[in-house]
Amino acid sequence: MEKPLTSKENLHKFDTLVAIIAKLRGPEGCPWDKEQTHRSLRENLISEAYEVLAALDDGAKDKLCEELGDLLLQIMLHSQIAKDDGEFQIDNVIRSINEKLIHRHPHIFGNSKVKDSKEVMHNWEELKKEERDEGVSILEGVPKEMPALAYAREISRRAVRVGFEWESLEGVLDKLVEEIREIKETASREEKEQEYGDLLFTLVNVARWEGIDAEAALRSANKKFYKRFSHMEELCRQRGINFSKLSYKEKDDLWEEAKKGVA
């Protein structure tokens, strides 16, 4: 006798997840799940992706496992919605990525030879070029909805794959100095905004040269500022001090104290 979906013996199986999602979206399923569309789930998908990033940043392995499951749920829901609408189903999603991985790794699944990861990335871009329609930019596939820093990193990485790159880190740093100088020299707000954008883009490339993810680095800095500023507020509460009425010097001293108290 076949055991029910909810039995412990079935909970580790991928087919069980497929069946659960189908049941939730079925005639006798959950009212909320049945109402969802590709569009209504957009924010959920983005939110769950950020939850995964947060778990990665925190190094929380158990949390990462849970958040990857939540992200997978979003993929499964979109796949079931597509199946309900006669578009495609999860089998097509899996087949598509399997075909893509095999095609883009001929040095693993074929007879090609590569000497290092740089050659792998170069070949990857050449194979992607074969898949694109004639005249389509290599930057076209980067989602414009990405956070600006992550988008800047990705389009610069793609440009690098076809040889558009500084010769050395010193060249990028010289460009950084140039952009800072231009911000100082510009007068209008519009010009300053443009130059500020150029400065951020150059900083992203400096980070790329150093092997740093600018988006992750800024998230880390935001988290650190949040903790230290909150610590300052707590110190003020403990001491009966109105933070907003402190002088600049007093606030700066309090900040230095918070830096020592919070890593």
Image (cartoon, rainbow, N blue to C red):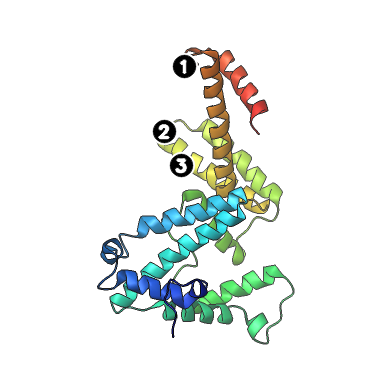
Residue bearing the label numbered 1: 244
Closer to viewer: mark 1 or mark 2: 1
Residue at the spot x=71%, y=81% of the render?
113
Closer to viewer: mark 1 or mark 3: 1
Residue at the spot x=60%, y=62% of the render?
160
Q: Residue furthest front?
A: 1
Q: Residue 189, which numbered label? A: 2
Q: How far is mark 1 from mark 3, CA to CA? A: 33 Å
Residue bearing the label numbered 3: 194
Query: Which is nearer the eye, 158 or 251?
Result: 251
Residue at the spot x=46%, y=72% of the render?
7
On the image, which quarter does residue 32 sit in?
A: bottom left
Image x and y of residue 44, in percent:
39, 56
Q: Which of the marked residues, 3 or 2, is nearer the chain's N terminus?
A: 2
Residue at the spot x=37%, y=55% of the render?
43
Q: Circle 3 — which element?
A: helix
Regarding residue 132, the answer to whether it shows in the image is: no
Q: Circle 2 — which element?
A: helix
